[in-house]
Image (tube, rainbow, N blue to C red):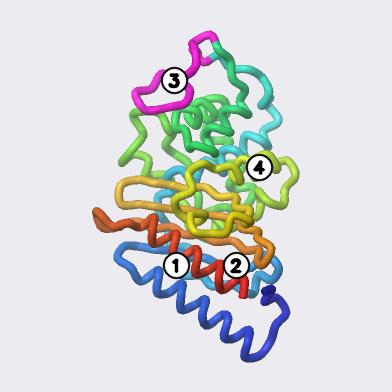
Amino acid sequence: MNHAGQTGAMSERFLSDLERACQTFAAQPGQIAVIVESKSDPSDRVAVNPTLAMPSASLIKVAIACAAAADPDLNLSTPRRIGDLDETFYCSILQAFEPGDKVSLKALIGLMLIVSDNPATSAVLNEMGMDKVNAWLAENGLNGTNVCVGFDDDSLGAPLRANLTHAEDCLNLLKLVETTPEYGFVLHMLRNNLRNDRIPRLLPDRAVIGHKTGTLNGLMHDIAVIDSPDAGYYLIVLANGLPDGHDFAGEIARFSKAVHDLMAE
């Protein structure tokens, strides 16, 4: 059911139920930020800790992809030789190729978004530089988000926590991806994400979900734009300082299902 334009007790009850679900979810141990916003009516919205700064982890890869798409100096189709890319000790799809094989920058962006490949991300950043990503973020009003550490082997783990974002910026980033034609291929890649153990996990098969996850020790994020026959909305979940051994991916999945059920009523 579309709640946009509703007034009175029904709309108030819907927002009250949504608020209760978000507050209960965010009350778990750790620092948790949540935004749920209807695509048809942004006033149908609940936000908990929307500007709480947290390490972005792999969420920043969406901004890197957009900055690359907007960079007039980059040709996304130009092939790059695998042997010329930085070597890595970490698991990467790039390791399946021969050194003489070639891959386009656009394909590297695909690996960066669809399987969150860190060496592919490092290769994209090496092509354009962090300054261009930060300039793109500033130009688009995403002032709570930065990139100051890359995704090379030496930066993964604790150093990567220096890259920051917050839930409101993540929401606005997804809106840019969805509404800007030059980022259309980015949205397509997010809709083909292969890491689906969080927001998409319990949603109906008919739902079209573009999303990106982020993970570090004690940190778990997922941000999504969701379109189903019954509802269209954004769901942002950022969490840091999580206790060891907690199945927070399952918590996100169950919360996502509860939100979908409310949005679709």
Mark positioned earlier in the residue sequence (2 or 1)? 2
Q: Does residue 141 appear in this view?
A: no
Mark 1 neighbour class, 10 Å CA radius: few under 14, some 14 to 19, many 20 or more: some
What quarter of the picture does the N terminus occupy? bottom right
> Is residue 96 a member of the stretch shown in magenta?
yes
- Checking the image for residue 188, the label placed there is 4
Mark positioned earlier in the residue sequence (3 or 2)? 2
Residue at the image position 63 percent from the left and 53 percent from the top: 208
Quadrant in the rendering for residue 198 = bottom left
In front: mark 1 or mark 4? 4
Quadrant in the rendering for residue 228 = bottom right
Task: Give the spatial CA distance, label 1 vs label 4.
Answer: 29 Å
Mark positioned earlier in the residue sequence (1 or 4)? 1
Name the side, left or right, on which 146 lies relative to 171.
left
Residue at the image position 61 percent from the left and 75 percent from the top: 265
Q: Position of residue 2 (x, y in %)?
A: 69, 73
Part of the protein shown in magenta = 82-100
- Checking the image for residue 18, the label placed there is none
- Checking the image for residue 49, the label placed there is 1
The amino acid at mark 1 is Asn
In front: mark 4 or mark 2? 4
State the SS at label 4. Answer: helix
Task: Give the spatial CA distance, label 1 vs label 3.
Answer: 40 Å
The amino acid at mark 2 is Glu
